[in-house]
Image (cartoon, grey):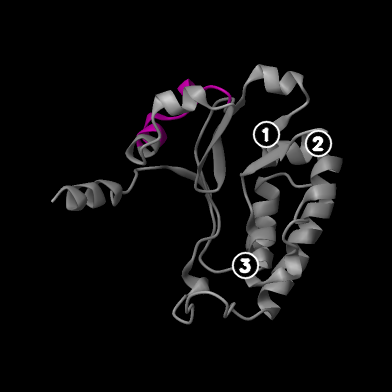
Amino acid sequence: MENNSLQSHLDTSDEIIYRDISDAGLNEKIIRQISESNNDPEWMLELRLKALEVFRSKSLPTWGPNLSGLDLDSIRYFAKAQVEGDRKSWEDVPDEIKRTFDRLGIPEAEKAMLAGVGAQYDSEVVYHNLRQELADLGVIFEDMSVAIHEHEELVRSHFMKAIPVHDHKFAALHAAVWSGGTFLYVPK
């Protein structure tokens, strides 16, 4: 009975107002919408568009579970909640979104103990912070949409290097539609 109660609690949807949401499926218009929303530099838009072509050309991977029933055209790949604030203060995160993180079991004590924490809701980072002593050592822990502007050359030189765009269909999908996320750089 406890599992049913927990599952029911987790299946609750949120009443969130979106400032930007894509149609289902994936095409050049949606890639441009994502890029514009993130205020991407031109090189990132070009990378996204090339990644879309790779995505379209690759078959579903066969090295994992059977994905033949996966309908990639029914997915909305981009949605940004209407969130205001500097994203450096948990108090600036809307209560509806805080309740979602509470339902997921992210306790305040854990957030207080981590060296840095980021919280993403749909396609947008809604909170991002790093302890000052790590920032003073040159560690960069930033919302990817911010880092691409404040640390553009670092991002450009490291983006999609661990798993290249051409590696498989879902690597290409990630390169095409990423939003939010974290950029972490630890200097030598």
Residue position for label 2: 151
Residue position for label 3: 170
Earlier in the chain: of badge 1 and badge 3, it is 1
Check disc 2: other Cα within 10 Å, few if <14, some if 14-19, many if 20+.
Answer: some
Nearest the eye: 100 or 184: 184
Nearest the eye: 12 or 34: 12
- Give me the residue at 73% from left, 60% from top: 48
Q: Say what secondary structure mark 1 lies in.
A: strand
Distance in Å between CA atoms under marks 1 and 3? 24 Å
Q: Amino acid at mark 1?
A: Glu
Earlier in the chain: of badge 3 and badge 2, it is 2
**Residues in magenta, as a range:** 88-99
- Give me the residue at 75% from left, 34% from top: 186
Q: Is residue 89 magenta?
A: yes
Instruction: Check whether the beta carbons of the residues at disc 1 and disc 3 lie within 8 A of each other.
Output: no
Q: Amino acid at mark 3?
A: Phe
